[in-house]
Image (tube, helix red, strand yellow):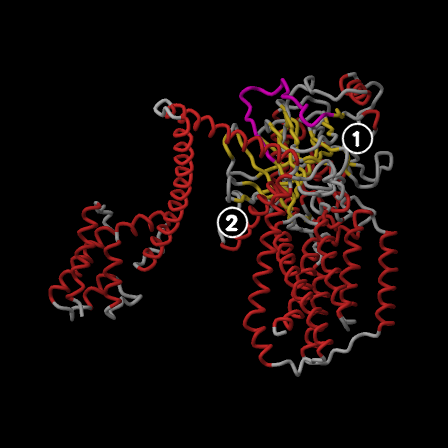
Amino acid sequence: MYDIRQFRPTLYLLLMLGFSAFALATSSPEIWVISTGLLLIHFWLTQTQRFAPLPRWLAGLITTVLFLYTGLNLWEEAQSRAVFILGQFLVFLQLVKLFELRGNRDYAQLLVLSVLLVVAAAINSASLLFGLVLIAHIFVALYCCLLFHLKLETDQAKAVLGLSEDNVPPETLRQDQRYLGRSMRRLTFLVSAASIVSAVLVFLFFPRGSGANVFSPLQFRASQSLTGFSDEVSFNNIAQITQNSQLVARVRVWRNGNPVQGTAPLLLRGRTYNIYSGARPSIGPPFRWTNSATLSDDERLVVPLRADDLRPLPGANADDDQWRQEISLEANGSRSLFAIAGPTSISISHGQPAIFYHLDDETLELQEPVVHPLRYEVVSRNSLRGNLTNVQPVEGDRWQRGLRQSFWPRRNRAPMRSAIDPAIAELARRPEVSGVDDAGPLAARRTAGAAPSELDLQIAHNVESFLRANFQYTLDLTDVSRLSDRDPLEVFLTETRRGHCEFFAGAMTLLLQSLGIEARMVTGFRSDEYNTWGEGFYIVRQSHAHAWVEVRGPEGWHTFDPTSSRLADATTAGKSIWQQLKHAFNYLEYLWAESVVAYDRESRSGLITATGAALDTGVNQASDAIRSVRQTLQSPSLFYSVTVRVITGLVFLMLGFLLALVGWFVFERWRLRQRARRIGLDSLPKSDQLRLARQLEFYDRLTQLLQNRGISRPAHATPREFCRSISFLPAEAYDAVQRLTEVFYRVRYGRRQLSPAQQRRLKRSVDLLQPHIR
């Protein structure tokens, strides 16, 4: 009966973990604040004996109102928020039940509701942090259920014996205090261990199958939609430009087979836009960007592809750099597949989603939005040049239509041009904007309809420099948002001179197009955050969403980034301890997503194949060894018994030796670091610490010997000053300490190397000092 009193605190902990798990899964801090706040209030009322249960009729009325509110939300909201709305209902239902607590029936309902809430949270999230909270919730729930079962039995026994909480025999409390708590913890540990083993076996041998993504539409939430990147560029929607550190993707990059370890920022293209509508309704909505190839379905330059059918293009030179990218993309609500410029091949790890390859700008797009994590691999040449005749299509009418539209000449179609404000065109021709040389303004020499030339790239460089030097990057666009009837790009260039990257990229595109130069705006991500853990990978966040410009030159398209105060000369490697901790957790989340969340039947087949191959190799090697031994053994029974015993003994011996070797290595490293700290080497690099700690073991023994005799070196004193301060020692001991200190300085600062024999003699000298120091 002593341990049963722990049931209520354990229940509070269980409810707190359930609320935290749901808040983590749904990114809803407000729900966590409300739920935990009411839980703490209930705990305070109970501890101060001020709690009074709600009347049944009032609790029923509140539950009915919550049920009607939830049904209305389910009717009005999208399907993707169904699990989130039901989870909210479960949270508030638990709070109502908590303030209605009267008997064991209410406790049982709270336990069931907490488990259901965590199930709803599990459908909404697959993050590592949620997984850790989920594991803690499972263990606490098991312990709480065992306590609740014991509570039921105890309450029934009290009712039969006529006992109350105040007249429980003291010997019973002492007996419970001695044995019950330990028994409950042991039982919880045994059941948990059995459950973990069963769960691991089920996970390994019965993975998710074809129905693994049945909940994927429910997992996606509106809060996950991209805020920095959008499939549509609209300057009036300021909310989409809000900074957000939410994870978008993890990307590993190899250049010509060599890993790129954060030495340069990563540019991932998503969409391109080359037509600006301005205020012309014939082009589209006012002040919007679009792509001329997508204005009409009949003129769309799109080829449907299978996942592995985008073959290398013959226009890619053998000397071009090959950039291989392994991308783990989170659910984001966009149909774009992000990649470095010039994709030549694509491979998706799981499933065969419909992929569209845009021939005009070489961008990749899915038929359906990304509503669950997606892993794919793209090889790019970081160039937009290339022949388009070797793309392998899917079969069917859609490909035939795409083939006709892509390679047959499009007749009777006037070229679509952006609606450019006259003030923008006038600004573009100014010498300080487009540039000037000894022959005069560059814009005056650029004739309409001329082929792309080096002059176009020179003008583009000048416009880029002008925008970087004279305009300011900001997300505060209050002034622009009030001017709904004016062109925001014209206001940006002529009045405010401040805006976000889409303003800079859009303004540069229009300035160049007004001079007849082919230019387009690109939206995607620019990441300079590199995680050095493991094999290393780029971290792409919502806040890395960016827009830049591509200009056609005589040899293809070139990239320009006019945004001021947005670029960095080098990547942020995460030098601070907090940044390193975040990167370490991010790497663990990456391993969790790759090894656990993405584990399915294909992964199981790969694991079984790899295990089988390793076993086959081991069996073959063992068979060869056994065959050579069998020739020396005549008796089959002797051969069998000796072989079994020898192999079994060797296996256990190798395992024991391996474990001992690993343990010795870890212990040795820890011992050397402790020694380096004691003798003042902790400020050096780790490699120097370990090297000197091995060499200076004799000095560490000396300082330990002196400390055991009550003689410690002050923190401010150098070893030589400390040696001079202990002149009160006997002359023989003092001379020995002085000689050992001199050897210390030669090794520490003179880079002298001690041989193993010299180290043994120095340690023996320290041992001989013990009887001479009092």
Of the residues shown, which amino acid type is indicated by label 2? Answer: Gly
Image quadrant occupied by the N terminus: bottom right
Contact (CB < 8 A) between labels 2 and 1?
no
Residue 443 rendering spot, x and y as whole percentages:
67, 30
Query: Which residue position holds label 2?
Result: 574
Foreground tag (2 vs 1):
2
Q: Is residue 479 above or below residue 164?
A: above
Find residue 731 and name its label: none
Query: Which residue position holds label 1?
Result: 294
Q: Is residue 436 above or below residue 483?
A: above
Of 364 and 220, the residue lying toward us: 220
* Residue 311 magenta-highlighted: yes
Q: Residue furthest bottom?
A: 167
The dominant secondary structure in magenta is loop
Give the alpha-carbon distance from disc 2 to disc 1, as whole Å: 41 Å
Q: Quadrant of residue 407?
A: top right
Image quadrant occupied by the C terminus: bottom left
User: What number of labels is visible?
Assistant: 2
Residue occupying image coordinates x 39% and y 41%: 653
Relative placement, left or right, of 435 versus 46 is left
* Mark 2 secondary-structure assignment: loop
Q: Quadrant of residue 40?
A: bottom right
Q: Which badge, 2 or 1, is on the more N-terminal residue?
A: 1
Q: Is residue 747 above or below residue 450?
A: below
Which span of residues is magenta-colored? 305-326
How many other residues sit within 10 Å of disc 2, few (<14), some (14-19) or many (≥20)?
Answer: some
Residue 253 rendering spot, x and y as whole percentages:
56, 35
Of 563 and 347, the residue lying toward us: 347
